[in-house]
Amino acid sequence: MADTRVEERVSVDLLVELAQQLRVDSVRCSAAAGSGHPTSAMSAADLMAVLLARYLRYDVHEPRNPHNDHLVFSKGHASPLLYAMLRAAGAITVDELLTYRDLSSRLEGHPTPRLPWVDVATGSLGQGLPIGVGLALTGARLDRLPYRIWVLCGDGELAEGSVWEAFEHAGTAGLENLTAIVDVNRLGQRGPTRHEWDLSAYAQRMTAFGWRVIEVDGHDITDIDRGFAEAVATRGRPAVILARTMKGRGVPQVEDQPGRHGKPLPDADDAIQHLGGVRDATVRVAQPDRSTPPHTFPAGALELPTYRVGEEVATRTAFGQALASLGAARGDVVVLDGEVADSTRTEYFAEAFPERFFQCYIAEQQMLAAAVGMQVRGWVPYAATFAAFWTRAYDFVRMAAVSRASLRLCGSHAGVAIGQDGPSQMGLEDLAMFRAVHGSTVLYPCDGNQTAALVAGMAGWNGISYLRTTRGGTPVIYQPGEAFPIGGSRVLRASADDQVTIIGAGVTVHEALAAADRLTAEGLPVRVIDAYSVKPVDAAAVRLAARETGRLLTVEDHWPEGGLGDAVLDALAGSGDLPRVRKLAVRQMPGSAKPREQLHAAGIDADAIADAARELVDGR
Amino acid sequence: MADTRVEERVSVDLLVELAQQLRVDSVRCSAAAGSGHPTSAMSAADLMAVLLARYLRYDVHEPRNPHNDHLVFSKGHASPLLYAMLRAAGAITVDELLTYRDLSSRLEGHPTPRLPWVDVATGSLGQGLPIGVGLALTGARLDRLPYRIWVLCGDGELAEGSVWEAFEHAGTAGLENLTAIVDVNRLGQRGPTRHEWDLSAYAQRMTAFGWRVIEVDGHDITDIDRGFAEAVATRGRPAVILARTMKGRGVPQVEDQPGRHGKPLPDADDAIQHLGGVRDATVRVAQPDRSTPPHTFPAGALELPTYRVGEEVATRTAFGQALASLGAARGDVVVLDGEVADSTRTEYFAEAFPERFFQCYIAEQQMLAAAVGMQVRGWVPYAATFAAFWTRAYDFVRMAAVSRASLRLCGSHAGVAIGQDGPSQMGLEDLAMFRAVHGSTVLYPCDGNQTAALVAGMAGWNGISYLRTTRGGTPVIYQPGEAFPIGGSRVLRASADDQVTIIGAGVTVHEALAAADRLTAEGLPVRVIDAYSVKPVDAAAVRLAARETGRLLTVEDHWPEGGLGDAVLDALAGSGDLPRVRKLAVRQMPGSAKPREQLHAAGIDADAIADAARELVDGR
């Protein structure tokens, strides 16, 4: 097979051999690791052999080539199969293959982009297809290149709603560059799947969602080839190859047997022998079509919106206006909405740059996944919804961090400050949620100019950055053009005699300032810090304030756990001279009330801050 | 209408009047509040008038009657309509209706169970139908009563994948006691929905998922009645009434107009006049069928599993075995699985009590929602999946707290200690996530006997309690039968000379003990605390240790944010005598490696603890 040219089609006999090699290598690497999911790899080996040798267009020596197809293993536990494919394609050696799941290896238990041929981490089921939709949108609408997206799905993961968000989005968007391959091996982790081998159940559903459905025998190379050919020839809609397969295919001891999920084969040597022994074929994967360069959008100068000090502006509005400005300055910025563009104010970008705006409707998981797909190809996605509704996509955010993805997320309508809509609409756990994401940045501006600066800054930051915005207007306190670096803070009130430091962010900065004015008038001088960078928090400023004022009061429109107060305490933890600290936060379940009533009822308004500061000083 | 008897059918003319009253009252209360979503109420008024007067069976004077039907407003923003229905049914007065969204009112912007006629909070879209599935499962499989579940959905929320998890679950389970009513008013918040008035698009999808689909003109009382009659007559599967409606129906200024979402009508008086003026009709809702009492399952004595001190047992195994014991002791305990019962060990319960075990397949949102539905009727649900995959259901957990729901959740496979499967399978943010849930309890046992005690205790606790378990075996250190109260902790090593206190939980307790033994042998006596109750953390024990040893070292198999370390810092914050604290946690993205290698690489094993303790004492 080493001599195979792309110009000539690999024969069926060679494909059968290649599939067996993929099985053997899956068994070998799992045996070497003493763990893994070889049976889940073996069911899809024939499917992947045909894809690799006949349909995939990919330069394995240049994995970041913009013209490459994209292959996403949504069933990430079938990683041995992916690594076996990479070995067959000449991307990795057999020696590396056998490092699978070792501490030193980049061949992790589930694929991650530590391997350059892997775009995104998988392993949390139901994520690959939504990300594939993002890649397909990128190919069709942004890059405007003929690369194809191939997503290998398990049957079990079709129970995840996120998969149906993807079927809906791709079907109605007519993404003909997207092909899902479902390995219907009938057996989940703990027993049969809901529909087992009832391919018609899946077919009905997918057809209803606007997809071309192609049923194949997943262990018949010729039938599989027919399936891929039909998928590639499909126009105007995405295609799904529904393949009837057997888990553990090829080794009678495990084939279609329950209780064989996620375990190496009981006798690997015997299994390899049964599969015809070790093979060392390589396949030359077809090169991508490099005829046209990726599309780009025009760029210009950045002219951020400016707001006059004293004017009232909602930070969500400043976010939207800054985003539109950024869109004019950078052609690589794209924006995704979960059907709340009028509230988050991404509508300004949508109006100015409709080609780079993606309406995901009320499907936050698909929205996040699409953003992940877009950043794979170097686009700079901003996605926004209510802060509360990001909880819907938390698993996708978590996995995006494993994917080393760079995403810019905005959550509007933070906290009780939203007012009458009540707790279902209030983001009160978003700071905790986003702080607990590896490598994340969490920002919470208090005025329009600060918001604009942070929105612009986010474009250049790696990892997952999150900006929290406020529904109602807040007074502008910073001049246009001031700098707000990540990890910074601003001291807004300070004197040599400060007895307490009040640390707020966002809406509570204004409450802190009002309290400080009252306290100062009473003869109790206090410091006020705007901790707009919640993660990383400005530890130096916090520690300095602790040393100089001895008492800290944190105030946040958030539950007491995991937010600004905890960030401040964490900054102090190692310092060895911890001051007296009091955290003001939302401690009771709010109801409906006007914003000021809410802040008061929650004990995070100027009254509560002033009371708490006095108590701290009195030592109560 | 006040004289209407259930025996006689309310006439169409009266239904038309009732629907207009519901519209008028929706307009009135939104006008009084100065906010709200009257146009989203007006589109569904005819549907709800027919339901209320002809199909609902509900004793409004006894909202907790087990025989009552259940009505869930999945489109919770249509709350004015729900409150108008309650007023028409005589449950609340018009005076109370006009307190809508006021600080003092239980009529919140989106419905919550502060109102006794509301089972669950809604307002985060796409949750009502999955919860309705839980209620329908409860009626059919647990209570075994003929009550019906009615769920009013918006069309926009059908974009949420969770809704399709519900369609799938209900369709394949054949829940004929469940009827969804979809108010297809074509307009979302920011513009048209994806399918607008293409009812056939929805019908195809729902039919494919096994539902009876009934299309109606949502403003034609007779046609609506036909729809309900067909739904009620449907056997063997759930039914959905797809109603073509107009947002703002009945008031030309807003009817089917964009830009009218979530706002009071521009001229309420004029609108009320246009709708025929204020009405004061009451409707007597039909009584439920009280002929048979709810089913119960046998109960017995509680005999928890016991483990010998020194034996190795995985806390996940102890969880499963304790859960099975609890199932024998309490007939009200039910268990839900997300297709990982063999891993979480809920399989023991499944084998013993199949009638009370619910397989939700890989659909964590539906699993959580089903548990919410079950606890509405007083059942005691335990639901389990990998700790990492609870992130998938965070919005449902958040809303369950607004629902004042009591749920017992278990997350297995916590932390890097799982080993080779890699980061996609590691719960590393679950403590942060669950701590930031209002009223939650977060537990993290370190041995089998402690796990068993906590599992049994959770059955009696209110609110959302979360138990974190470990994949691998850990040595048993507690005797069977020891008590582990919520908010408690255990001091495992202590002397008068302790220089440092090491605070761990779960797997890190054993690492802390190993480190303590080494340090003591070196002449550095240290205290060890098992903080099995992460929320509420044992603040008294933490503060005592701080005072007595001056230095604290927290160790957790979790990201540094929002977990055990932050809980400890929070406990110290107000105390005024903060010690030197160092947090050990997972700070780099893990890969694949064996459990011990992972703990070492993350710097949370005995070596790292001992080093950190020495450094703390040396003042480094």
Image (cartoon, coloured by chain):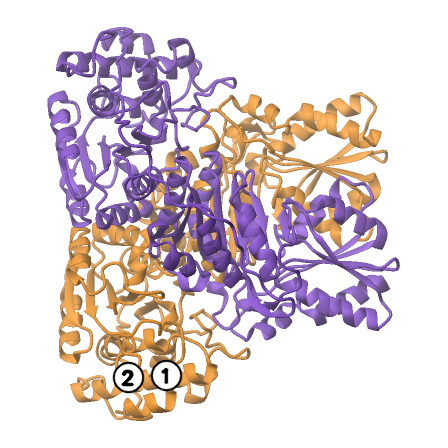
Chain colours: A orange, B purple
Where is residue B276, by image quadrant?
top left
Q: Secondary structure at mark 2?
A: loop
Vertically, is A219 above or below B432?
Answer: below
Where is residue B70, by image quadrant?
top left
Q: Amino acid at mark 1?
A: Val
The residue mark sitting in front, 2 or 1, is: 2
Chain letter of the residue carrying label 2: A
User: Which of A355 and A366 lies nearest the eye of the viewer?
Assistant: A366
Q: Quadrant of the C terminus of chain A?
A: top right
Horizontal placement of A1 versus B30: left or right?
left
Q: Are marks 2 and 1 in contact (CB under 8 Å)?
A: yes
Residue A121 is situated, as x and y percent measured from the top left of the image, at 43, 65
Q: Count the marks: how many?
A: 2
Vertically, is B327 above or below A348?
Answer: below
The circle drawn on residue B21 is: none
Residue A105 is situated, as x and y percent measured from the top left of the image, at 51, 79
Horizontal placement of B525 versus A29: left or right?
right
Would you call the spot at circle 1 few (<14 residues within 10 Å), some (14-19), or many (20 or more)?
A: many
Chain letter of the residue carrying label 1: A
Vertically, is B36 above or below A237?
Answer: above
The circle drawn on residue A251 is: 2
* Residue under label 1: A27
Residue B327 is situated, as x and y percent measured from the top left of the image, at 44, 51
